[in-house]
Image: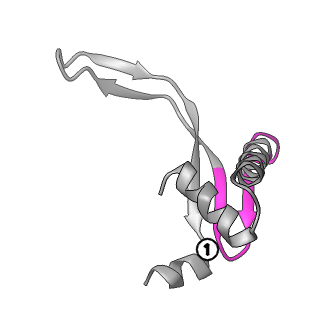
Amino acid sequence: MTKQDLIRKMAEEAKITRAQAGEALNAFLDGVREGLEIDGSVTLVGFGTFKVKELGEREGRNPSTGEAISIPSRRVVRFAAGKNLKVSMN
């Protein structure tokens, strides 16, 4: 499902225009992004939790030359599905 498919589905379910659904989805995504920046996690009870995880610096290899390279630390977002989502998938 693409973002446009999701907007279409939201518009149908909520009986609103696609433009309104698009604005609502963008507001939701901005809220999740801000929540992750500020708190480091966003929990949607029954759906799941988005968390920021810090990956430390590590050593890797250049696949072409085999030379060792340093891969810098970075922050990544992880998602853990909630109970209701897990149950609905099985």
**48 within the magenta span:** yes
Q: Secondary structure at mark 1?
A: loop
Residue for point 57% across, 64% down: 80
Q: Residue 40 location in percent, x, y?
A: 74, 47
Q: Nearer the viewer, residue 84 or 29?
A: 29
Q: For residue 66, which quarter of the picture?
A: top left
| Label 1, residues with CA under 10 Å away: few <14, some 14-19, many ≥20 | some
Q: Nearer the viewer, residue 19 or 6?
A: 19
In-front residue for pair 13/76: 13
- The amino acid sitting under disc 1 is Gly
x%, y% of residue 83? 60, 80
- The residue sitting at 74% across, 49% down in the picture is 32
Q: Is residue 67 above or below residue 17?
A: above
From this view, report whether residue 68 is shown above or below residue 13.
Answer: above
- Residue furthest right as drawn: 38
Residue 80 is one of the magenta-drawn residues:
no
Residue at point 68%, 72% (across, down) = 13
Rendered location of residue 57, percent (x, y): 50, 29
Screen quadrant of the C terminus = bottom left
Q: Compare residues 84 and 58 and report the one nearer the observer.
A: 84
Q: Is residue 76 above or below residue 25?
A: above
**Among the 4 quarters of the image, the one containing residue 64:** top left
Residue with the mark numbered 1? 82
Which stretch is magenta? 35-51
Q: Position of residue 38 (x, y in %)?
A: 82, 42
